[in-house]
């Protein structure tokens, strides 16, 4: 089963259809929410969306990697990565189950 990619335009249209804001207001709302999430993550904050999941920024230290073709060792610089941890509610929803507990 191939999944559809949901775009900003799709999210804006869903807000327009379900909330009743104008298309312009819906697009602006989606942009503001996404910008707030991006800014918070860039600042190193965890973003938790109840009943959905958490976006967490983790720091990875420097390590040595290896080129798979040549076997040459290459240093990999320290960096920050973002991970997503789905809530139990989202996991249950994806699996067609109902979740009785809190997130």
Image (spheres, rainbow, N blue to C red):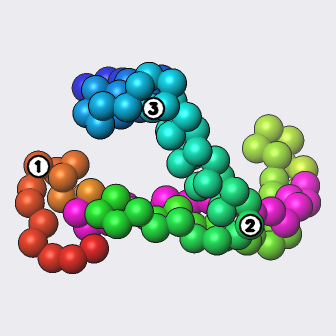
Q: In this rendered view, identify the residue nearer to me: 17 or 84.
A: 17
In which quarter of the view is residue 43 placed?
bottom right
Residue beneath the point at 69% across and 57% down: 39
Q: Is residue 12 magenta?
A: no
* Residue 85 part of the magenta segment: yes
Q: Which residue position is annotated with label 3? A: 26
Query: In terms of sequence position, does the residue under pointer 3 or pointer 1 come before the other?
Result: 3
Q: Which residues are magenta?
A: 74-89
Q: CA distance from mark 1 to mark 2?
A: 35 Å
Disc 3 to disc 1, how far (Cα)? 29 Å
Residue holding disc 1: 96
Q: Residue at x 15, y 76 (%)?
A: 101
Residue 5 x %, y %: 42, 26
Looking at this view, is 28 or 45 the one in front? 28
Question: Which element is circle 1 on?
Answer: loop
Tag 2's secondary structure? loop
Categorize mark 3 by other alpha carbons within 10 Å: few (<14), some (14-19), many (20+). many
Q: How crowded is the residue under tag 2: few (<14 C-alpha within 10 Å), some, or many (20+)? A: few
Q: Residues within 10 Å of mark 1 (few under 14, many from 20)?
A: few
Residue contact between numbered discs 3 and 1, judged by CB atoms under 8 Å:
no
């Amino acid at each position: 089963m191939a999944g559809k990619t949901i775009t900003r335009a799709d999210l804006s249209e869903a807000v327009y259809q379900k909330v009743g804001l104008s298309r312009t207001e819906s697009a602006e709302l989606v942009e503001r929410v996404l910008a707030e999430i991006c800014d918070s993550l860039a600042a190193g904050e965890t973003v938790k969306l109840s009943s959905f999941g958490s976006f967490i920024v983790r720091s990875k230290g420097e390590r040595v990697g290896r080129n798979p073709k040549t076997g040459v060792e290459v240093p990999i610089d320290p960096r920050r990565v973002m991970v997503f941890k789905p809530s139990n509610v989202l996991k249950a929803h994806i699996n067609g189950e109902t979740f009785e507990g809190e997130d």
